[in-house]
Structures are given as C-alpha cells and as structure tokens.
Image (cartoon, grey):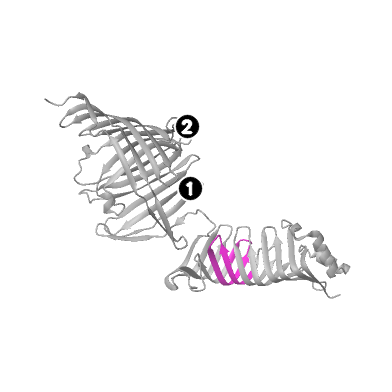
Amino acid sequence: MPGASVPMTRRLSSLAAAGLVACIAAAGIASQAFAQSAIEELGAETIDRDQPVALIADEVTYDTNTGRVTARGNVEVYYGDRTLTADEIVYDSRADRIEATGNIVLRDPAGATVYADLADLDAKLRDGLVRGARSVLGERAKLSAVEARRFEERYNALSKAVYSPCDVCEEDPTPLWRIRARKIIHDEEEKTIHYEHATLDVFGVPVAWVPYFQHPDPTVERASGFLVPSFQQSGNYGFGTKIPYYVVIDDKSDMTLTPFFTTEEGVIGEFEYRRVFRTGSFIFSGSVTRTDYTGESSFQGNVDTRGRFDADWLDEGARWGWDIRTASDDAYLRRFDFSDNDILTSTVFVRNYWNDGFYDLTGLYFQSLRDNDPAGQIPRVLPEFEARREYADPYLGGEVGFFTATETLFRNNGRDVTRFSLGADWEREEILPVGLALRGFAELRGDVFIVEDDPTRGDFTSARFAPYAGIEARYPLIWEEGDGDAAHVIEPIAQFVVRSIRCRQLIIRDSSPR
C-alpha cells in the first residue's frame, strides 16, 4: 500500500518516529469511524502538551514508502515548550526534518514569535530555514526579513531585514523609526541583536548609516551599554554632547556614567548610582569638573541624593528618608544647564500616615543660589514636627481631633524662633432630606513662641490662645445636559464664624533694651 489517508476532526500522533501513525496504517485501521471514536475517547482536553513531541491536525497521511507524514488543516506541532502551527506540514522521518507552509507561526520558550510563509526545520523546531520571516520579540519589537536561518540552536540570521518597535497600521504603513540592515543576527543565548551595514530610517527617510552595531533584545530588562546621546549649546560652555553609559552592577544596583564634552569648558563628569534594598532604595547622583570661571582653576560640582526606607523598627507603616541637594557655588547649576532653581532644599524625615492620624518629623536645610542673599540669614529648620489623631465624638457626634506641632528656625546671624502649638478641633456634618448640607466646626488652639537674638527686642517669649467656632450651610444644585455628557453644579455656601477679634498675647519674658 503506497499510502494511507486518515481524515478526522482532530488527530494526535507521535513524531519521534511517526510510530503511532505507522502502526495505524500498517494495521489497516484507517477508517473514519475508528478515528472519530478514538478522538471521542481521548477528548481534545486530554492532549498532553508536555510530552516530547506531538502533532495535532485535521487530516494526517502516512506514506510507508517514503516515511513521510503529511498533516493538513489547523496543524499544531508541540516539542516541549516550542510550538509550530501551519496550514500544512510534511515530516520526513528519514531526514528527521519538517517542512511547513501557509500561515506559519513558530513560538519559543523565551516568548519570541515568528510568522513566515515557508519553513524547513529540524524535528526539534530549533534549526532551519524560514522565508518571509516576521518575528515579534517581547511585547512589541518586530523583526522582518526576506529569509531567516537558524543555526546552533541559538542564532537567528536574517537577510535583508528590518527592526522596529513601532506599531504599524494600514493607513500609515511607515513606522516612526526602523533599522534596515543587510544582515541581522539575533543571539538568543546572549539576548543581543547584531546589525551589519545598518541604516536608521525616521518616517521612512534614511538619516544615519553604520557598518556594525548591537543592542540587547527587548526581552532584556537591564543590560550594560551606551544610551542615546544628547546635544546641547550654550553661551557659557559652547557646544556640548552627553554620551551616557549604563552599567549593570548586580540584581540590586546599577550606575549611569555620563561624560559631558564641551567646546569651551572641557569635560564634566556626571554620575548616578541606584540601589534597591529589602526595605527601600536610594539614588546618589551629581557631577564634577575642573573649571576657571570663578577666577581661578578649581573643582566645582553638585550632589543630588534621595532615599526612602521602611521604619518598622520605629512604628508599623512608618517611613524615613532624605532629599539632599547641594552645589559648590551659586552659578554652577545654571552655568551648565543642570537646573534653574535659585534655592536648593534638603530634607531628612520620619513620617507615618494612617486613616485617623499621622505624624511627621522633618529637618530642612536651604542653600540659596541668589547673589544678594546673605548666607548667615538663611534659616535651618530643625525640628519641624506635626502630629494629629482623630476620634469619633460620643457626645456631639461627628469627629474630634487633637493635634500638636513644633517648629524651630536657626540662623547664624539673625533671629531664632521656636513655636509650640497644641489644640483640638471638632467637626460634624448633616445632610437634610431637602439636600441642604449643614456643617458645624470649632477649634481651640494655643501657641507659645520663643524668640532669641531679635535685633530690636532681644530675647522674649510670648503665648496666645485663639479659639473659634462656626457653622456652614451648602446647597449643591446639579443638572445634566444631553445623555449625561455634561453636568453643571452650582453650590451656594453661607458660613458664620465667631472667633476672638484680637488674640490675647501674653508676654512671658522680654529682654529688649530699655
């Protein structure tokens, strides 16, 4: 018998040596009834995709003379984690190769997907030749080629190929940018893409050509290498270019080193170091250069660092951290276009927030970059503390809150001030059936001020007590237009507040000159 054709709805067979199909053909069990009953007995859901090799198709033919298995219609081949789908495949058991045609889709364990018109592969779906190849790497990046060849179970060599991460639509088939190359080699083991004689197109127009370059494939999240350079121009340093180089240190840290080449001021070195810990992370960045714009040759630079960490050792849910910024002189950041800020604020903090309260302890330091600001009169804030806790009011309803705060301002030359505050407030809101919202509120607050080195009054301490209470009425009115596409709200508000017109101030200590 030259061959046997077994048409069926779905069919499972072993491709290891086409044994199952051969046995069926040899035994003469090639009837539609047997095939259908076998499938009903197995069921489509019982197909084990983890077995070494499996073939699923609408129709399978085995030629006993040539040792070829031909599968047609919704063909699916599974070899471990690799899959191949096509309209038709021919498996040559003697050569141990597969030829596939029509709507070919090949998927590998790394997540890459290859679409093709014709494929000649080994039985393990690892090496072979593909024509009209189109590959999708990761989620978006795409490779297309006239011909693709796979070898050594790791390299995909594409001839007359194009790479682009851009989505292409039928209305505008030209991607935003793409790389055309005489040859593109994708190394699946090293996860890199190599280009030979590559041309960069932007909106379909060639803008650059290089004989060779490489970059990580889109499945790589972090890899050392050069980043996109940038170009700048200024009257201070002339023309400049930045060529950043990204360095992967380990799984928890990395660094970016950026030489900033200028025509007038030489080279400025920029750096940024990042590290992640179990309880938080921090970034340390800055720049340094040797310049003579200050009148003499000296090193100038800046530092910018910030960090956030859990402080469960203090309180569950608490966080601590810092934001520190400083520069060597007033003009450095503006001169090299790093920042236009005229004041740099540095903070160190510990804080925690929850549904009914919070606390926040902060220290602040200010560096003025203004020409006329005397450094001795710039205040330092240490500490700045604020805390609040709210409770349900069991007597009047609503919520009652208790709060405290303190703040101390130090100066090298000038007045030092410390403020202590303590108070409580109450609030309750009711919405009447007619839609009128009524809110009652009140607050009792006391403050103590300690002043030292005041240029006019010397040292003194004062206190004040500032209570107030009030009621507020709101009546929101809303109407919609169309099918709810637009809504308009008008809310008349009336408020009546009673508080001491003049806060009572008690002078506790006064050392002003008489």
Crowding at dot 2, Cα within 10 Å, few <14 / some 14-19 / many 20+, comes out as few
- The answer to whether residue 239 is above or below residue 89 is above
| Occupied quadrant, residue 379 | top left
Q: Residue at x 42, y 51 (%)?
A: 256
Q: Which residue is mark 1?
A: 249
- The answer to whether residue 368 is above or below residue 48 is above
Q: Residue at x 75, y 61 (%)?
A: 44
Does 133 appear in magenta?
yes
Crowding at dot 1, Cα within 10 Å, few <14 / some 14-19 / many 20+, comes out as some
Residue 327 seen:
no
Which is nearer the eye, 80 or 76? 76
Q: Is disc 1 placed on a helix, strand or loop?
A: strand
Q: Is disc 2 placed on a helix, strand or loop?
A: loop
Q: Amino acid at mark 1?
A: Ile
Quarter of the picture containing the C terminus is: top left
Name the spot of residue 169 as percent of width and height, x first.
51, 71
Name the spot of residue 14 as percent of width and height, x first.
77, 62
Residue lying farthest front? 434
Q: Earlier in the sequence, mark 1 or mark 2?
A: 1
Looking at the rendering, the stretch of residues picked out in magenta corresponds to: 129-156
Name the spot of residue 179 as percent of width and height, x first.
48, 68
Name the spot of residue 45 as percent of width and height, x first.
74, 58
Which is nearer the eye, 446 or 481? 481
Residue lying farthest left? 514
Q: Give the spatial CA distance, label 1 vs label 2.
A: 29 Å
Residue 186 seen:
yes
Q: Amino acid at mark 2?
A: Trp
Q: Which residue is mark 2?
A: 313
Quarter of the picture containing the N terminus is: bottom right
Q: Residue at x 27, y 55 (%)?
A: 265
Q: Left or right: where does residue 105 sit relative to residue 514?
A: right
